[in-house]
Amino acid sequence: MPDFLIPGVAQVPVQPTIALYFADGPGADAPLMFKMAAERIDIPAGETDYAISDRYTLPVDVTLLSLYPHAHFLGKNMQVHATLPDGTSRTLLHIPQWSFHWQQDYRYSTPVALPRGTTIAMRFTYDNSDANVDNPHRPPVRVVAGQRSTDEMGNLLLQFVTASSVDRSRLLEDVTLREAVANIALSPVTSPAAAPPLPFSFMGRIDDGQPKVFLQRGERLYTVAAGDVIDGQYRVERIEATTVLFTYLPLNIKQTITIGKT
């Protein structure tokens, strides 16, 4: 259970408490917690209305029990809407003036039934200007996503129950796939692995039944034919009229060096 503490003007004691409620028996329906979010947040200094958004279309009928919005000091306006399959829209949550102190579970007094095909959309805005009295940076600086309170976040946790175990499994499967796709999208783009430049200089060749070439690497000289392995890293594949084909064995990458006839 994390505690979020912020600086104050006086020292005060902190004594968290936990309330446990016991039922007569196990619950019939175990709720599911689902997260909507924008993992990429990059708010320029001075920006007054930076926005993030996310949306999700329900694959099954659900009953929405609660919402838990989460942002830090730059949060400004939080809106969550549901667009039903018939095109009607319903506001699920609206906090027009967000406060860091308001990150908590907002539980409906009457759970909200949402049919399959409903699209839930969240839109959070942020104020990274001097006009935001809660801005921890004076003057404002660029702020990105992160775990520190001086970073920013944009999460929305939704608590559902489904009508059946089959629907529960279907929802879990869909949510898991959605998260996997999001993780792939967030993965850094890396360039394909590349072999280092060939370290050899061509010194000459002989053709006495089996072509061979003379190669130099620094102060070392090599006489090699097709099939030979040099220093455990390079295998000579073919010796042709004007090129020698190598395989760089650590990455299994083909490379060539231009040669000439002697």
Image: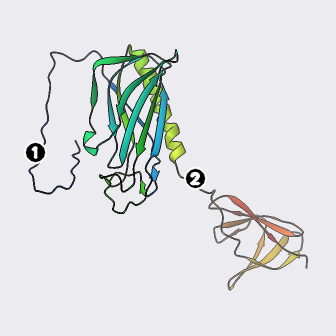
Q: Nearer the viewer, residue 240 or 17?
A: 17
Residue at figure coordinates x 28%, y 29% from the top left: 106
Dot 2 corresponds to which residue?
189
Relative to 191, is 48 on the left or the right?
Answer: left
Quadrant of the image occupied by residue 156? top left
Relative to 103, is 245 on the left or the right?
Answer: right
Label 2 to label 1: alpha-carbon separation = 45 Å
Q: Earlier in the sequence, mark 2 or mark 1?
A: 1
Regarding residue 33, the answer to whether it shows in the image is no
Residue at figure coordinates x 33%, y 62% from the top left: 138
Q: Helix or strand or loop: what does disc 2 sit on?
A: loop
Q: Name the disc covering residue 15, or none.
A: 1
Q: Position of residue 38 (x, y in %)?
A: 45, 42
Q: Amino acid at mark 1?
A: Gln
Q: Nearer the viewer, residue 68 or 242?
A: 68
Mark 2 or 1: in front is 1
Quadrant of the image occupied by residue 166? top left
Residue at figure coordinates x 89%, y 73% from the top left: 207
Residue 91 versus residue 14 in the image, above or below = above
Q: Position of residue 123 (x, y in %)?
A: 44, 37
Q: Are dots 2 and 1 in contact, CB under 8 Å?
A: no
Q: Amino acid at mark 2?
A: Val
Regarding residue 190, the answer to whether it shows in the image is yes
